[in-house]
Amino acid sequence: MKTRLTSNQIGTVVRLILSVVLLVILFKVVNIQQLHGHLLKVDLLHYGIGLGFYFLFIGIWAVRWHYIIRATGENISLRRAFVTTLVGNFFAMFLPEMVGSDVARMYEVSHERGTNANIVSTVLLDRVIGLVSVILMGLVALVLANHYLSDPTAVALIVGLLAVLLVGWVAFFYRRLMEWVFKRLFSLPLINRFETKIRSLYEALYHLHNQPRLLVITLLLALLVQLAEVTAVIFVARASNIEASPVHFFLFMPIIWLVTTLPITISGLGVREGAFAFFFAEVGVASSEAVALSLLFFSLKVISGMVGGLALFKGSATRYLRQRAGQSTKNIAV
């Protein structure tokens, strides 16, 4: 019996192939012996500090998401938000980073609260706030990095992206416009089945949008998230003895984040390494050093993802044992 691949499975295979192709092309350009040497001569102290800052980055991210969750009236512990964010990092290792992380967080919390509009809205708003902070940092970085970047059109691209995001935000929360969109959208035979869920999600997002204090605090937390991750990269660079000013990391990392958000490869593999090599070459860092830095940075994601995987396994095992215990109790009662 023949089995057909779903569109999601086909997309995953395509992204995996593209990741491999990009890495193969990159490794043909990079001096493999030098790359191998950089990876072997890692200072464990600086690497450990970088790893600590990476977990701090995840912790602040969890605080930001937890703050949004509390604004909806849901009662989830900060510890649960932190563990769920780690689990999201685990899934992001195998899927496009944003998709894997966000779907995993929705799925994990749904075990306790059910898949409701409030939970979905918190993940979506958390992601949008994070994207806004990255774009703002990228805009500032590009303005300040004019001395280092030879392509001035990058500034226009970031400004355009920020403008699109802001216009989209205003349009999405303009009720008259959205009612006009919904009226035509829900007249379609397939989409009208989801009218109740879509409207509930929109109302949940609109409720969060009407809390300016929430938006300001979460944006500030988002900037702290980016600061912690950049600091982690700086220490990883020091661990591999890469000579680059900390200023360069604050200039280039937001741009690299924007590039790697494109859902075209598995966990950004290939795209991220190419972006590191391209941007850091502008300030005299050898391509082998830049790729080594990218791979070491990715190793932080892998370590945190594995911790998340262990947490996922523990949670799944606990739920399974509870279900078995519940079934046994019912059988005894019968």
Image (spheres, rainbow, N blue to C red):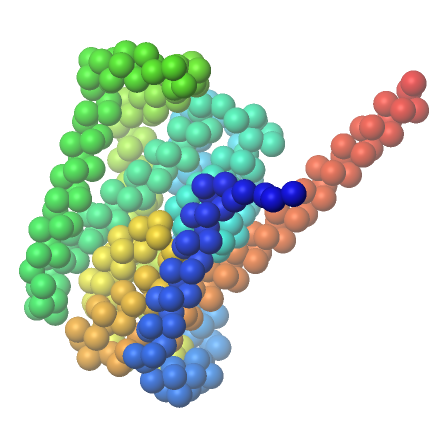
- The N terminus - image quarter: top right
Q: Is residue 59 visible?
A: no
Residue 36 quadrant: bottom left
Residue at image x 26%, y 49%? Answer: 134
Residue 61 in the image, given as x and y percentages of width and height:
41, 46
The answer to whether any part of residue 131 appears in the image is yes
Looking at the rendering, in which quadrant would you find the C terminus?
Answer: top right
What residue sits 18% from the left and 75% below the top? Answer: 283
Q: In the image shown, does 172 or 122 lie closer to the viewer?
A: 172
Vertical placement of 148 versus 8: above or below? below
User: Residue visible at 48% across and 77% down?
Assistant: 44
Q: Residue at x 27, y 56 (%)?
A: 259
Horizontal and vertical percent position of residue 175: 23, 15
Query: Where is 258 relative to 189, above or below?
Result: below
The picture places residue 225, in percent across and down from the top left corner, at 35, 51
Asked where in the image residue 121 lies, by quadrant, the reply is top left
Depth order, front residue of 101/217:
101
Nearer to us in this view, 22 or 167: 22
Asked whether, in this view, residue 235 is left or right of residue 329, the answer is left
- Percent position of residue 172, x then y: 24, 25
Q: Residue furthest front?
A: 1
Q: Is residue 124 above or below residue 159?
A: above
Q: Is residue 99 depicted above or below 256 in this figure?
A: above
Q: In the rendered image, which quarter is residue 155 located in?
A: bottom left
Q: Is residue 228 left or right of residue 13?
A: left
Looking at the image, how many numbered discs can be counted on the residues? 0
